[in-house]
Structure formats: C-alpha cells, structure tokens
Image (cartoon, helix red, strand yellow):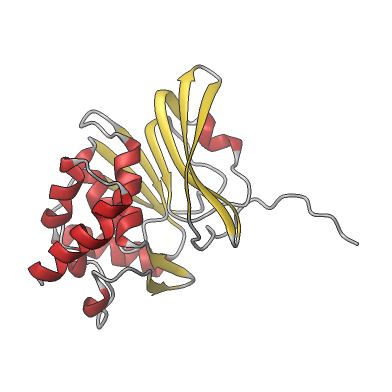
Amino acid sequence: MEQARFNMVEQQIRPWNVLDTRVLELLGKVKREQFVPPGRQSMAFMDLEIPLGHGAAMWYPMLEARALQEMHLKRSDSVLEVGSGSGHLTALLSHLAGQVTSVEIVPELNAFAEKNLAAHHIGNVALERGDAAQGWPGHYDAIILTGSVPILPGAFQNSLKVGGRLFAIVGDDGAMQAKRITCVSPGVFESTRLFEINVAPLQNVQQPKRFVF
C-alpha cells in the first residue's frame, strides 16, 4: 500500500507541478484508501476518478493535490467546500485550514463523509446537508467547488473575504477550465486560468442561456 502511495506521488502528482511539501506530506498522512467506497480500495491510487454513486466521484489524486496547492491555505483560514463526496478532500482541507464548512446535497454521501471524518477524529469540519450550487451563507478565506459549473454564480465571489481564493472548474463537458479567483479588494476580483480538466457538474448548477434553433 505504501509503495502504491509513493508511486502515486512520484508518477502522478509531482509531474503535475505539485511541489508544495505541506501538500505532499499530507498525502501520506491522510490515507486515501480509507475514504473510498467499500470494495474499491484497489482503485485508491489510480489516475482516475472513483465513482461514489449519485453522479458523484472522488477526484483524481493529482487534481486534489493541485487544487490544494493553488489555494495557498493557512491555519487561520476558513474554507467552504461545495460537495463533500467521500470526505477525503474535506479531510485534507481540515489539516491545512482552521475551519472547514462542507456542504453536500446527497444524504447518502453526507452520511458517508461524516462516517469517514469521524473515523479520523477530525474536529474542525462542519458538515452541512443542503444545496450550495448557487452559494452558501457566510464569508470565507477560501472556497472550493468539487463539481464543475457551466457558469460561475456570482454568489461565490461575493462570499470571499478580501484576499480570499475561489477554486472552480468552469465550462461545459469537453471545454472546462480550472480557475483561481482572488478577491483583491472589496468587489474587485482577479481570475487566473490554471489548467484544463473535465469533471462532473454540481447538481442544480446554474445554466447559461442557450440559443434554440
């Protein structure tokens, strides 16, 4: 198992320009195989998404690691995660930030994440059940959307504190961009395109107006 974890880091994650030692060390501390659905432990370190049911999936290992690196988290940060999934990314966030609020719309996944986080005695996470596809109350130092959005609701940007960062995968199937959006001053945002990636959309995402012929 440890050899598979080492290979994941060296062959998948480092080549994707993930060099932050905090992130790399964390991947050895938070055991990914303990967060996958039963019977799928053999898939834990593979370069693929792991189905969770209900249209959701665990991100590729390299995507989790790269997103964490791009967020530049500090122990004083409050984080909003939209889509708890298995709770693995939630657990990673909890080790880098001070407080994590994670919202999951699917009751079964909410329960799965709660069980996994409790097994790892993680106490700085508030798991919420609800629909956060259009935003969630509060203001945060960092926000991460674990599903893609065709267009990014303005509510997420408006929930950032000054200096806050938002990680979102924006676009339609086959044409998605991971972006980091930073609130540089009240009402002023800076957007950075990071890389192309394709992931399933959040449930109930806002849809753009489309031409009908």
Dividing the picture into quarters, in which one does residue 140 lie? top left
**Which is nearer the eye, 145 or 171?**
171
Instruction: Please give the count of numbered marks on the rendered protein.
Output: 0
Q: Residue 9, percent across and down?
A: 20, 58
In the rendered view, would you say 46 is above or below 167?
below
Q: Quadrant of residue 56?
A: bottom left
Q: Nearer the viewer, residue 175 or 105?
A: 175
Q: Residue furthest right?
A: 213
Single out the residue that lies furthest toward the bottom: 39
Residue 95 seen in render: no
The residue drawn where x is 18% and y is 68% is 34
Identify the image quadrant of the N terminus: bottom left
* Residue for point 23% across, 28% down: 76
The reply, left or right, for residue 34 in relation to residue 81 is: left
Q: Nearer the viewer, residue 16 or 213?
A: 16
- Counting from the top left corner in percent of width and height, residue 201 is at 54, 59
